[in-house]
Image (cartoon, rainbow, N blue to C red):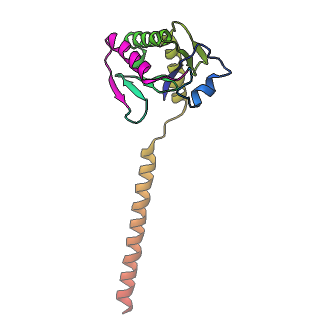
Amino acid sequence: MSYVIDFIKTKKLDFDNVYNLLEGTVNPTSEIFIGTELMNKIVQEIEELGFEFEMFKSETEDHCELNFSTYQVAMFNTEIAISLPYWDSNINEGTNKEIKQIINILLENGFSGFDSQTEEFITEAYQFKSIFSEAQTHVNQNENSHPSVDYSLYLGLGIGLVLLCVIIWKTINKKRHYNNKHIS
């Protein structure tokens, strides 16, 4: 499970269009189309900040992924998404600073963001750390409210049942063998 913030290349993002834009396809002539040139520009601006990441570029589509040590930035023709797993390491100041700087790059390049967890639109500096931290707390509470299943109990019962069946089978076979010996 991850915290995802989506960015669309428009300043006209609102509740009337955000979900359609996130779920739809986009024509290359559309104003919200994110071409390879813009993706490369954003990657270059992120590289200039000195962040460490591995890049994956799709050979068949205009798709690019920047894989950082604890999070990912995925770029598509329709949107750019920042995805952070709910790990404690993603609450630190370094990650917070990187995310803020990446968000600023996207905003400066004509994007608006949408945080679907809070249903907030991002058009200016964003207090990511406090929002992510609060969301992570809710996720952790939800995970902890469901008791974990102890499969060792089921394993023990299964092994016990198999042993019981083997003992019964051996006992029946012994009786058959004994009866066959004494009947003949």
Q: Residue at x 56, y 20 (%)?
A: 31
Question: Does residue 165 lie above or below 179 as drawn?
Answer: above
Where is 145 relative to 113, above or below?
A: below
User: Could you tell me if residue 84 is visible in this image?
Assistant: no
* Image quadrant in which you'd find residue 124: top right
Q: Is residue 54 magenta?
A: yes
> In the image shown, does 126 or 112 lie closer to the viewer?
112
- Report the residue at 66% width, 20% height from top: 15
Note whether 170 is above or below 123 in the view shown: below
Task: Answer whether residue 42 is magenta in the image.
Answer: yes
Magenta-colored span: 32-57
- Residue 42 position in % (x across, y down): 41, 16
Residue drawn at point x = 44 percent, y = 25 percent: 74
Hey, which quadrant is residue 49 in on the image?
top left
Query: Along the line of sight, which residue is nearer the eye, 104 or 129?
Result: 104
Q: Nearer the viewer, residue 152 or 134?
A: 134
Considering every residue shown, the one lying at the far top of the view is 125
Q: Position of residue 54 (x, y in %)?
A: 32, 24
- Horizontal and vertical percent for residue 38? 44, 18
